[in-house]
Amino acid sequence: MVALIQSSLKFIYLFTIVFGFSLPALCQSGLKDLNAEELIQNLASQQEDGNFEDIYGAMLDFYKNPIDLNKTTREELSSLFILSEIQIKSFFHHIEKYGELINEYELQSIENFDLETINLILPFIQVKKSAFREGNQSFFERIKSEENHTILFRFAKTLETKKGFHKDQPLENRYLGSPDKLYLRYKISRPRDFSFCITTEKDPGEKMFINNKGPEFLSFHAAIFNKGNLKSLVIGDYRIQHGQSLLLGGGFQLGKGSETITTTRRSSLGILPYNSVVESGFFRGIASSIQINPHFLFTTFYSRKHIDGNPVNLSSDSLSDNSQEFSSIIDNGFHRTQKELDKKSNIFQQVAGGIASFKKESLEIGITGIYSQYDRNYSKPLKDYNQFEFRGIDNYNLGFNLNYGWQNFYFFGEAALSKSGGKGLIAGLISSLSKEIEFSLLLRNYQKNFHSFFGSAFGENYKNINESGIYMGLKIRPSKKWLITAYADQFKFPWLKYQVDAPSSGNEFLFRISHLPKRAIKIFAQIRFERKGKNLKDNLTKTDFVVPTSKINYWGNVDYKVNEHISLKSRIQLSFYKQLAKETGYAFIQDINFRWERFKLGTRFAIFDADYENRQYVYEKDVLGSFSIPAYFGSGARNYYIFSMKASSKIDCWVKYSYTMYSNTKKIGSGLEEIEGRKKSEIKFQIRYKI
């Protein structure tokens, strides 16, 4: 362990010395970088309950299809979670007063826009003048001339052999496919015009083709936008984001993070073509939005697809038909063993719904109706904590949402009802009290029998059920070089939860201070505290006791841009978990990133020591379109090296090698994922070809 740390530090030191003096003479690239790490750190809590893959995917879509500022809408800008309400208001006031923007540099002249915000938003926006929009081209001419026309291939593999791939294991106890992870996507799209995409993926252990019937996972969509009164039409796979995501959440959930204001409200983005390889949480069918008149928009959708589920295990003397019931839905997308294959696509789901929206000036009102049906009975095993959760064959939801802007206040909310009679409510406001101070307030109440299958509204639980709470966020910018963000969240769970055998409550606080002493240096420190009830661990009695459980996290981070070609990032993360006794965990991370002409190289060296309850989540760079936020726990060190190159005007390549070395174990993982030894390493390769 010590030798590993010493050799890695020596390598980093020598690399910095050599390149620190040789790179300044090289040319700087004019590309706008996607600072995914900073954005995701601000948008999410970096805990295990965040759907980071989809958050990153949503930001990546904007990165590859930048918003045209001369054609954008308020909802579109809000969905970036970067601009404040006062900045959005100032932007449209500037457009109304001075007309279309000439270029991105004009953002500096807009009131309330600061340099840091502009730098964050630049990768996701563009400015096109009317004369250059090629609006007179035919549809097929636009397809033929579109630059965003690519084929992308990705290969990844863990170099050590996992237990599930040993041939000496019985067939029922091993993986059926190869250890390779494969991804292939063809896509052509133009923002606000059209999109066509075919994606296929195979996870490690899966066969590429299932029983010679087709790829293990295949996703497809064809979409057109803004054709007269037809605002959108999608055939294939899609998502819908509407209101405050109480009924239709677009598939991803934002947690509580250091961005304490903009993430409290959701934007009604409507129908979104599906581009991810997450094998759950999307619709498959047809959806359309029609603009009835300048103020009314009507959206309808229908989905039918097969999903994975666990059949009910019945005793041999039962007279019930096992095929008519299932006990749970499986959403991990794994089909590696025969048991997992037997559960693949064994439940048929149909969903139909509609949304009627009215929008005039700063007022927006919407009504939503959804009906969902399975082809068999959802019969979840009855436990004390889950007795109010959904059971049956079908469900329906009715909802109402409202947004209203008044001066520097923006009010928003959504209320919904499910077939069970359970109700859900979320309401809040965002206000720019001054140029220096922003404030947010959010109230929520999701009853214990409220069932929403496709929602992802703001909350502490993963699902919007059995929860009430009040959240307050604050952002203060005392000067251009200082930023303070904080939030406080108080929540209650009126009924029992998994591993919480009594009604409970909790609270959570975050405080973060950021400082920019120079343009090349950024420093921040953060503390996050959470306290909630949980069953007593290792309890030997027959009765489960709910006791206060707390966790406190400390972050310290320094970003330093040495020159145009080298940047450094140093971080320390500490956490303390306490139920009866206190447990600790830490991680020290050092990043060095190089960039010159058409090449980029990123490296990391990290050491950590943390038990499972104190596992450290740390974002790391990955190939474009892929996402990595591993959990560090145990004792060890982690390194990665990622290299990217623009081989030509049409070809981009990425290669990543990463490994983790543990010092306190002889085995890594468990079950079929178990690896003999102390090291786990992975190689990843990706190539993108622009047609």
Image (cartoon, rainbow, N blue to C red):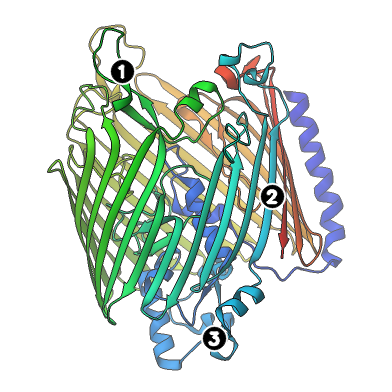
In this rendering, position of residue 168 left or right of residue 383: right
Circle 1: is it few (<14), some (14-19), or many (20+) Cα within 10 Å? some
Can residue 483 be seen by looking at this rendering?
A: yes
* Most foreground residue, 422 or 345: 345
Residue type highlighted by circle 2: Phe
Q: Quadrant of the C terminus?
A: bottom right
Residue 471: x and y in percent read: 27, 51
Q: Quadrant of the N terminus?
A: top right
Whole-Å distance between the Cαs marked 1 and 2? Answer: 48 Å
Whole-Å distance between the Cαs marked 2 and 3? Answer: 32 Å
Q: Identify the residue position indicated by label 3 in the image.
A: 135
- Check whether the beta carbons of the residues at disc 1 and disc 2 lie within 8 A of each other: no
Q: Residue at x 76, y 28 (%)?
A: 4
Question: Which of the two discs, 1 and 2, labels the residue nearer the N terminus?
Answer: 2
Residue 538: x and y in percent read: 36, 12
Q: Secondary structure at mark 2?
A: strand
Mark number, residue 536 = 1
* Most foreground residue, 624 or 131: 131
Q: Secondary structure at mark 3?
A: loop
Instruction: Say which quarter of the image contains residue 325.
Output: top left
